[in-house]
Image (cartoon, rainbow, N blue to C red):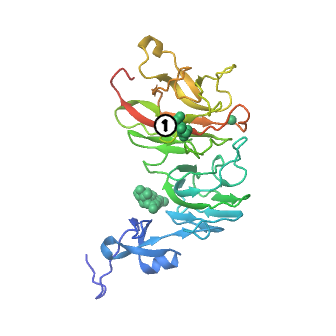
Amino acid sequence: MIKLLSLFTVVTFPNGACAGSSGDNGTCMTARECSSRGGSANGYCANGFGLCCIFMTSCDSSTSENGTYFVNSGFPSPYDSTGSCELTIIKSHPDVCQIRLDFDRFTIAGPEKMNNVCNQDQFIVSGGNPIPTICGFNQGSHMYIDAGIGSTNPVKLTFVTSGNSFERIWKVRVTQIPCSTIYKADEGCLQYYTGVSGQLKSFNYEPITGLQLSNQDYGICVRMERNFCGIQYTACPDPVNNRSRSFTLSGNSNNPVNAMIGSGAGPNNCANDWLLVPCAANVGRLQPAQALCTDRICGGTFSADLSMQPSSVLSTVKPFRLWFHTDNVESPIDVDNRGFCLNYVQQPCTNNVL
Ligand SMILES: *[C@@H]1O[C@H](CO)[C@@H](O)[C@H](O)[C@H]1NC(C)=O
Ligand SMILES: *[C@@H]1O[C@H](CO)[C@@H](O)[C@H](O)[C@H]1NC(C)=O
Ligand SMILES: *[C@@H]1O[C@H](CO)[C@@H](O)[C@H](O)[C@H]1NC(C)=O
Ligand SMILES: [Ca+2]
């Protein structure tokens, strides 16, 4: 039954995601709703019936708005001072289990150069599962924070800046992910990648001056795409150095360093800093030897053999997961290591890949 209530037509539309005219993402709503929730309208959505409402906030604030951008004080200008800048994230709905952070901009001071510890500037996540502290250059990276089920303690993001003058800039997009969605990350993955191919980098990876961060311990997961059974990793091209530094985890990377494997005693093991690639074997190895595989890889060359020659490395352990671990010591044995940048390609369930 249709009731005509008034002469006015009331147009309703869902509060969906929208792209603002500035290029930032927002939520579609009415002008009144946007201003009462503390957002700023930025272009139209819902065929012109709604406004794309952008939420941007800075130090010592809290947000329950999905898609909030957390920026440095004075953004888009850089911030060159010391202090502590915190955002408290409140679940927009009890049915939010994860928070995804996208580092649209992320430049703070890097680690000290002896042991690569983030002791000047720090980015700290608290209130969720333990997350390693990071620093340096991390634009384009992401993190998933486990926010727990139901109403839990809020997750807090803190940028601590201290020490020398440095032009810091950050813009972190905070997305709240409902428990029931198919696009949430698998349990235990700080980073979660989808797609048949892609690129994985350690935090503060940058081939010219970036340094591998100490005190890291986290999982990197790649969603198994349909009809794919294995995954192949290859060190990224390094366009700036004569000898590639795109996989330099241990040793002095100012000199050639072979790949090291395993976790036992001895000079070529990965007891301190390592990338765990489950049952890794070099691509192209003869079949009988394929049974021999390794788990930890470190050194200054990416290969599952003790070799100076880089190789593509195959793993067929499912689900596809890496684990990255570093201790708190570098100098004097480990010098100028950059961490890793790897390209991955999932392998179809043929070609002897089980
Ligand atoms: C807006 O969202 C799209 C899709 O998720 C994303 O690719 C893009 O980077 C976002 N833009 C900004 C400025 O956050
Ligand atoms: C937050 O926005 C993203 C799209 O940007 C959407 O996928 C997600 O479901 C939203 N979360 C909630 C709790 O509505
Ligand atoms: C690369 O090698 C050339 C020739 O040996 C040298 O002049 C140049 O400085 C090197 N570049 C780097 C980034 O090491
Ligand atoms: Ca170390």
Q: Taking the image as drawn, is residue 88 in sight?
A: yes
What residue lies at 52% left-to-right and 65% top-to-bottom?
68
Q: Is residue 281 above or below residue 49?
A: above
Q: Residue at x 58, y 30 (%)?
A: 300
- The N terminus, quarter of image: bottom left
Left or right of 164: which side holds 142? Answer: left
Residue 269 in the figure: left or right of residue 201 = right
Q: Nearer the viewer, residue 350 or 265?
A: 265
Q: Is residue 66 visible?
A: no
**For mark 1, does the 10 Å Cα neighbourhood hold few (<14), some (14 to 19), or many (20 or more) residues?**
many
Quick check: 150 above or below 247? below
**Where in the image, quadrant-wise, is ligand 3 located?**
top right
Mark 1, secondary structure of its residue? strand
Q: Nearer the viewer, residue 85 or 308?
A: 308
How far across and how far down the image is residue 152, in percent? 63, 56
* Quarter of the figure that contains the C terminus: top left
Q: Residue furthest left?
A: 1
Q: Residue furthest bottom?
A: 7
Looking at the rendered structure, the kind of residue marked 1 is Leu
Query: What residue is pinned by disc 1?
Result: 342
Occupied quadrant, residue 268:
top right
Q: Provide residue 117's location: percent of width, then percent of height.
A: 71, 45
How many numbered circles does the render carry? 1
Q: Residue at x 46, y 32 (%)?
A: 234
